[in-house]
Image: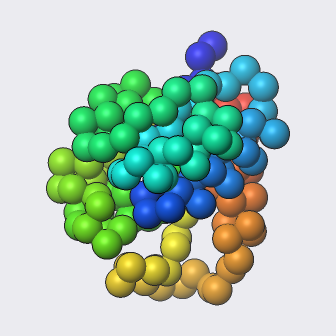
Amino acid sequence: MNNRILVIDGQGGQLGSQIVKALLAKFSGISVTAVGTNAAATAAMMKAGAAKAATGENPVIVASRKADIIIGPIGIVIADSLMGEVTPAMAAAVGQADAVRILIPMNKCENIVAGVGDLSTSVLIQDAVAKAGRYLESR
């Protein structure tokens, strides 16, 4: 079974790199692909250990079609979020993907998620990794 996990991040890629590290530390037999909305985000996720990486709109579209799980900040499904780095085509590709989406509720960049407390980034990442694990175990 090929468990293809796509991590998408923008800006400096700090969230994405932490997700990549946490996934690789927790699971074996997974393939983590990282797509950054910019080169800095991609580089950070590559340094964290992603098996494959690319940058920009078309890689988000292509990788979203191939993923079993997509993980990233909630902004990856909102056009013009992450300070304009997420294009409408990127948001649509993630939203229409035949994958499980694990969206991290980062209350930044004018996207506020109601009902979500002020949790630390590390707690949010731990929860995202746990949710990925439950999905992988159920397959």
Rendering coords of residue 105 (x, y %): 52, 70
Corner quadrant of residue 80: bottom left
Going by the picture, which residue comes out furthest to the left?
88
What residue sits 48% from the left and 45% below the top? 42
What residue sits 37% from the left and 52% below the top? 38
Q: Quadrant of the C terminus?
A: top right
Q: Is residue 19 left or right of residue 56?
A: right
What residue sits 52% from the left and 44% below the top? 43
Residue 94 seen in this snapshot: yes
Residue 69 seen in this snapshot: no
Reply above or below: 139 against 108.
Answer: above
Q: Is residue 26 left or right of residue 56?
A: right
Number of marks: 0
Reply above or below: 85 against 139.
Answer: below
Q: Quadrant of the N terminus?
A: top right
Q: Is residue 30 left or right of residue 26?
A: left
Rendering coords of residue 34 (x, y %): 50, 38
